[in-house]
Image (tube, helix red, strand yellow):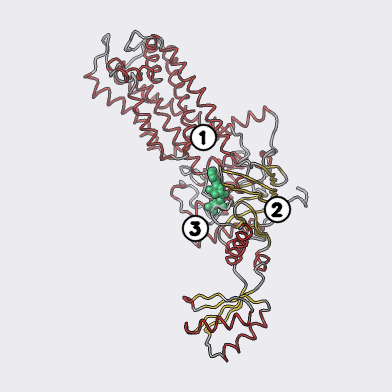
Amino acid sequence: MTMTLTAPSRSPLARLRWAFTDGWTITRRDLTHWANQPVQFVVNLLFSVMVLLMFGFLFGGAMSVPGGGGYQDFLVPGVLALTMVFGVEATFTAVSTDAQRGVTDRFRSLPMAPSAVVLGRCTADLLNAVLTLAALVVAGLLMGWRWHNGFAAALAAFGLLLLLRLAMLWLGIYLGLVTRSPEAVMALQILVWPLGFLSNAFVAPSTMPGWLGTIAEWNPLSATAAATRELFGNPGWGGEGWLAQHPLLLALLWPAVLTAVFCPLAIRRYRNLSR
Amino acid sequence: MPAEEPAVLAENLRKRYGDTRALDGFDLTVAPGTVHGLLGPNGAGKTTAVRVLATLLRPDSGTARVAGFDVVRQAGQARYRLGLVGQHAAVDELLSGRQNLEMFGRLYHLSAADARRRAGELLERFRLAGTGGKPVTQYSGGMRRRLDLAAGLILAPPVLFLDEPTTGLDPRARNEVWDAVRRLAASGTTVLLTTQYLEEADQLADRVSVIDHGRAIAEGTPDELKHRLGADRIDVVLHSLADLPAASALLARIAGAEAETDPDRRLVSVPVRDRMAALGELVPALASAGITAEDVALRRPTLDEVFLHLTAEQKEAVA
Ligand SMILES: Nc1ncnc2c1ncn2[C@@H]1O[C@H](COP(=O)(O)OP(=O)(O)OP(=O)(O)O)[C@@H](O)[C@H]1O
Ligand SMILES: [Mg+2]
């Protein structure tokens, strides 16, 4: 019982085809994880929804939004952006677990396309992000949140959110390959959570003590949250500064900068596994 | 692959990690269809050598070929011909055994149907068919190891690397892995296997390389390595501990070599050149000296003794 060997193909077109085929195999692995652990999967989805409900109902009464409007109109875009940033934990856990368990090494010893590991990870994590966004949108709509500038603008807002998630993906891959320790996700949480809350997701940066407010204004999360509020036609905090005046530009710039820094770092790190 | 081309060839491999020379002029030749043992203590460089040969690690210098393909310049070609079972089971914990094998099969570019069929065959062969549907988190260490081995065999590769395949396994699971390796060897696969267990090399390997401080310090069949100690040994277990000094002197005189004693086991052991003559002389000599022996045994040196001897030789040479 011998297997016929597929002769390694050298043409660029065949290589590209294999990169996508192998990438899809890796993506399917994540989909199978979800199917094998449906409870875990649903809990992960519901976690973001819970954050939304908690802030909406517990703190919603105490919050006043400038220019009137319900707190949920303000809150939902904030939580959407927050969830994209927190996604870095999922990427980190997946990548570091594979690296620690030797699965990454196994992949590297196979004749598969090397880029497929990253491509598969991107696709799976973005799919997960889309599902999480969908769950949040449904919950938001039930809470009374609406978009007011039409479907195209709303779609653009979701695009910006996924762009932020993509930037976080490179950060997650890089850190996962550096630490190779899924346990280090605790340390990552300690870094990510303050960053999540030191933003305009829940409250106006102007209400924060001076330097904290500055951090919150510069936070990439704030840029995406402010930009999506604008696109959804939801109330924002306004503000006089240059940062507050150009949320759309920043929501494109920040992910671009993060990707420009961490994508090459992640790829170099992956290559250096053979050092 | 031409008949004269070795299945695995390493020439003067070097790899440094900071000040550590993980590989320091490592040479290896493995003939096709043989099982080759790479024997060495912790930190000897076994894993580093295997990782270089399996295309996972770039050597600082030196060359290596697997099935005739350079592991650096023709890594892609080499990967179609090698299987790797690393020191730690490298399978996806959240997938079932079957799902793992199907995924790896697809990544070896088998068609979906072939990958499914192959997964079934391998599960059957490694006696995992009953548990193939369960997630790997529920597997025992031995089952995990067997699954890992199966994953390394998806393409029935001509060359298989096994890095300490039985470390941490109970005797039953260890025997299962040994059986699997023997069957592979019988079907013509070339196996390079690292181990810290001399017994394992003795049991499985046609030839053994002893590796220490990143270089091969001895190579040969297990029997040849045993012969390098130069002699067989006679062990005498005494009835009474009080006879130990007298017996030790007697054996030393007959063998013309220093005797080793182990008071706990009331054992005197000595290397001998002409085993039968020494034995013939020893038994009456013991009787006339009034020493009662509980057991007299003539034996080959163990690989343990060979190994201690070789590494000690190495240290002397360095000093
Ligand atoms: N990634 C690394 N970074 C730094 N040092 C390393 C690295 N990998 C191996 N070493 C060092 O290289 C030497 C050889 O290591 P290697 O893992 O090859 O030994 P080994 O024979 O497989 O040992 P063991 O029996 O413990 O598995 C050791 O001193 C080890 O500390
Ligand atoms: Mg090792």
Which type of secondary structure does the marked residue at label 2 adopt? strand
Residue B146 appearing in the image = no
Quadrant of residue B69 within the rendered picture: top right
Q: Chain of mark 3?
A: B
Residue A10: image x %, image y %? 70, 32
Tell whether label 2 touches label 3 (CB within 8 Å). Answer: no
Residue A178: image x %, image y %? 49, 36
Quadrant of residue A142 within the rendered picture: top left
| Residue picked out by circle 3 | B169
Q: Is residue B274 above or below residue B207?
A: below
Mark 2 nearby-residue class (10 Å; few <14, some 14–19, many ≥20): some
Q: Chain of mark 1?
A: A
The residue most toward the front is B319
Q: Chain of mark 2?
A: B
- Discs 2, 1: same chain: no
| Mark 3 / mark 2, whichever is N-terminal | 2
Instruction: Name the residue rendered at 47%, 35% in the picture.
Output: A176
Q: Amino acid at mark 1?
A: Arg
* Circle on res. B143: none
| Residue picked out by circle 1 | A28
Q: Nearer the viewer, mark 3 or mark 2?
A: 2
Q: Amino acid at mark 3?
A: Leu
Instruction: Please tell me how many numbered marks the rendered image carries.
Output: 3
Q: CA distance from mark 1 to mark 3?
A: 32 Å
| Residue picked out by circle 2 | B29
Q: Is residue A153 above or below residue A185?
A: above
Q: CA distance from mark 3 to mark 2?
A: 29 Å
Which type of secondary structure does the marked residue at label 1 adopt? helix
Residue A164: image x %, image y %? 44, 22
